[in-house]
Amino acid sequence: MRKLAISIILAGLGLPAGAAEIRSDYTEIDIAKDCATFEAGEADFASLVCPGWRGYPVLYYLGDLRESVFYGFPPSGAGHVWESFSAFNSTGPTIEWRIETEGEREIPIATIHRWFVRSDPDNPDEKIEVLAVEKVGQVGEADGCTVGLVMASGNAKANETARRIADEQARQFACGADERVLVGDGLPEFDRQEN
């Protein structure tokens, strides 16, 4: 009887019985200390693998004072898709992982990562902060990409907005087909290039 009552209450709230919950977990990455280079190029070009959340890796692709980051397991045999801001940029050390929990099962479905993008080419200290919401690549799936960009500079609700985008859109987002969610005026140009 109690189980039936809970199901009726959840149905009344618009939630399915046994619905998954989503929570945040955080990891820190120091690229110089925590990551291993698996491909090195000329000057500052390099590809690194770093520890992420419970075995989910974080892949950094560095080049020309820009970063491209992939969270989770990349598709096997496929080339890297470069996603980054056009202007010089870097990421912060903290990654927020949005974890979907259902019973004993926990799966990271999205990440939220703060980027620092140079807004004036002549002034390296003048930067715009942007939160990138990323779909996490899962084993056996060929999906992992940027779902949304949220202007963080001057936006007190940036984290809340990014979490909402992650929770509502990351799981079903079709990389390379769906349009990214863009929130805020003055977002720097962001590119996706398939290699």
Image: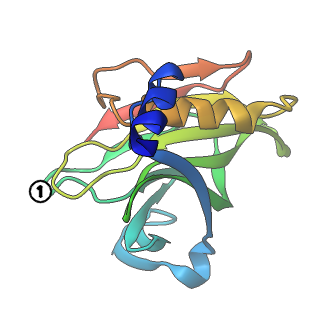
Q: Residue furthest bottom?
A: 33
What's the image's color scheme? rainbow
Query: Where does residue 134 sit, x and y in percent of width and height?
Result: 47, 42
Q: Quadrant where the N terminus lies?
A: top left
Check the image and report above or below for 9 versus 37: above
Name the kind of residue labelled 1 in the image. Answer: Gly
Label 1: how many residues lie within 10 Å, few (<14), some (14-19) or many (20+)? Answer: few
Q: Is residue 160 left or right of residue 25?
A: right
Say which residue appears at 49% left-offset and 78% top-offset: 35
Say which residue appears at 16% left-offset and 51% top-offset: 78
Say which residue appears at 52% left-offset and 47% top-offset: 22
SS label for mark 1: loop
Q: Is residue 33 left or right of residue 52?
A: right
Is residue 96 visible to the viewer in this orientation of the structure?
Answer: no
Foreground of the two, 70 or 61: 70
Is residue 78 visible to the viewer in this orientation of the structure?
Answer: yes
Q: Residue furthest left?
A: 77
Residue 151 sits in quarter: top right
Query: Where does residue 177 sit, x and y in percent of width and height?
Result: 28, 21
Residue position marked by numbered label 1 in the rendering: 77
Number of numbered discs present?
1
Foreground of the two, 166 or 37: 166
Check the image and report above or below for 44 versus 79: below
Q: Is residue 31 left or right of residue 92?
A: left
Check the image and report above or below for 140 versus 41: above
Query: Where does residue 50 sit, x and y in percent of width and height?
Result: 46, 73
Foreground of the two, 82 or 153: 153
Say which residue appears at 88% left-offset and 29% top-offset: 154
Q: Quadrant where the C terminus lies?
A: top left
Query: Where does residue 129 sit, x and y in percent of width and height?
Result: 75, 39
